[in-house]
Amino acid sequence: MNNKFIETIISDSPEKEFEVRIPESKLDEVIAGNTEMRMLSYRTIFHKKFFENIDVSFPYLDLTLKQIGIPHYDILKVSTEKGEFFVELSADKKLFE
């Protein structure tokens, strides 16, 4: 629930937008691996355009949970018209056998 999905980052000066589409936990790694972003990060502030929730309005429903940043065995909070539930991704067990 704390790993936002970052769609883009925008630098203040110069105003430049970078499409990244990554979990927030990978942002530092992506900036360090991109020469232009790395150089800008020393001189400017990056603003993030992000998603905190995945619902029908999420524009990247074709991405896997891993691509969105949800780790193996995570517990997801799911909200429905019947209330909130917590779902363990226990089907991931086969990945570790």
Image (spheres, helix red, strand yellow):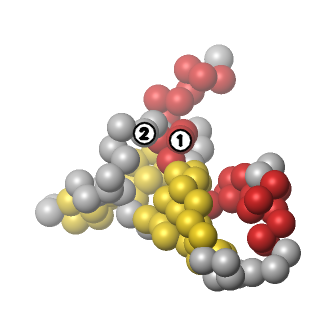
* Three-letter residue code for mark 1: Gln
- Residue at the location (14% across, 63% down)? 81
Q: CA distance from mark 2 to mark 1?
A: 6 Å
Q: Where is residue 35 shown, x and y percent of the image?
A: 81, 54
Q: Is residue 3 visible?
A: no
Q: Disc 1 on helix, strand or loop?
A: helix
- Residue at the location (54% across, 39% down)? 66
The label on residue 63 is 2
Does 26 sit left or right of 79 as displayed? right
Q: Where is residue 60 shown, x and y percent of the image?
A: 37, 47
Q: Is residue 94 above or below residue 8?
A: above
Q: Disc 2 on helix, strand or loop?
A: loop
Q: Where is residue 31 shown, x and y percent of the image?
A: 75, 58
The label on residue 28 is none
* Three-letter residue code for mark 2: Leu
- Residue at the location (81% across, 80% down)? 43
Are dots 2 and 1 in contact, CB under 8 Å? yes
Crowd band around label 1 with a 10 angstrom C-alpha radius: few (<14), some (14–19), many (20+)? few
- Residue at the location (56% across, 27% down)? 93
Does 56 sit left or right of 3 as displayed? left
Q: Is residue 72 above or below residue 7?
A: above
Q: Residue furthest front?
A: 14
The label on residue 67 is 1
